[in-house]
Image (cartoon, rainbow, N blue to C red):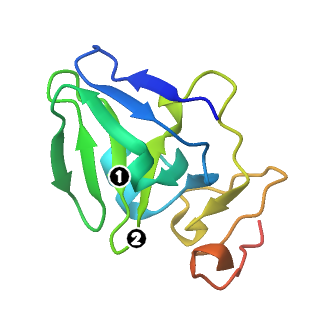
């Protein structure tokens, strides 16, 4: 397994990831919408112990549910630690080009508009994440 080295936009924060993604998806939850200023965001999930800050000191905060970290200089949103789990979500735009290959959409009950593609669109969470596998009909 190769490692992934990435950084914020200004280079003040460097991350090192020692694992391949466990899951990759688009999140439409209202928490992500508010924090990212977007209708949905690409996320790659890794084991928490595989994601480390190797340079700089990101700022931590929680808006609604997810403890998140960002760069204090440029504001790049970096990671979110999933509460009560050993999982960390990394923003897809921080992955090397071509690495983000989403398998599904989650929290589509909060979607601003339908996104029509060939991926499953879960109303909340898929069963693999403790959800019901209910999908939306777009």
On screen, residue 70 above or below 10: below
Picture coordinates of residue 52, whole percent (x, y) = 33, 39
Q: Residue at x 51, y 67 (%)?
A: 110
Picture coordinates of residue 15, whole percent (x, y) = 36, 30
- When asked about the image quadrant of residue 38, the answer is top left
What residue is shown with label 2?
85
What residue is shown with label 1?
80
Question: In screen coordinates, is 56 left or right of 93?
Answer: left
| Number of marks drawn | 2
Residue 86 seen in the figure: yes
Report the Cα–Cα distance between label 2 and label 1.
Answer: 12 Å
The residue carrying pointer 2 sits among few (fewer than 14), some (14 to 19) or many (20 or more) residues within 10 Å by Cα, namely: few
Q: Secondary structure at mark 2?
A: loop
Q: Secondary structure at mark 1?
A: strand
Q: Nearer the viewer, residue 130 or 133?
A: 130
Residue 33 seen in the figure: no
Quarter containing the C terminus = bottom right
Q: Residue furthest right?
A: 118
- When asked about the image quadrant of residue 64, the answer is bottom left
Sequence-first disc among 2 and 1: 1
């Amino acid at each position: 397994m190769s490692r992934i080295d990435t950084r914020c936009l200004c280079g003040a924060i460097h991350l090192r990831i020692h694992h391949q993604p466990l899951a990759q998806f688009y999140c439409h939850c209202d928490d992500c919408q508010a924090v990212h200023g977007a209708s949905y965001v690409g996320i790659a999930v890794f084991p928490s112990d595989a994601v480390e800050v190797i340079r700089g000191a990101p700022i931590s905060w929680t808006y609604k549910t997810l403890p998140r970290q960002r760069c204090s200089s440029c504001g790049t949103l970096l990671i979110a630690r999933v509460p009560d789990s050993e999982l960390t979500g990394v923003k897809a735009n921080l992955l090397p080009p071509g690495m983000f290959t989403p398998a599904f959409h989650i929290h589509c009950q909060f979607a601003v508009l339908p996104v029509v593609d060939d991926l499953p669109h879960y109303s909340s969470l898929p069963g693999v994440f403790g959800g019901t596998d209910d999908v939306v009909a777009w």
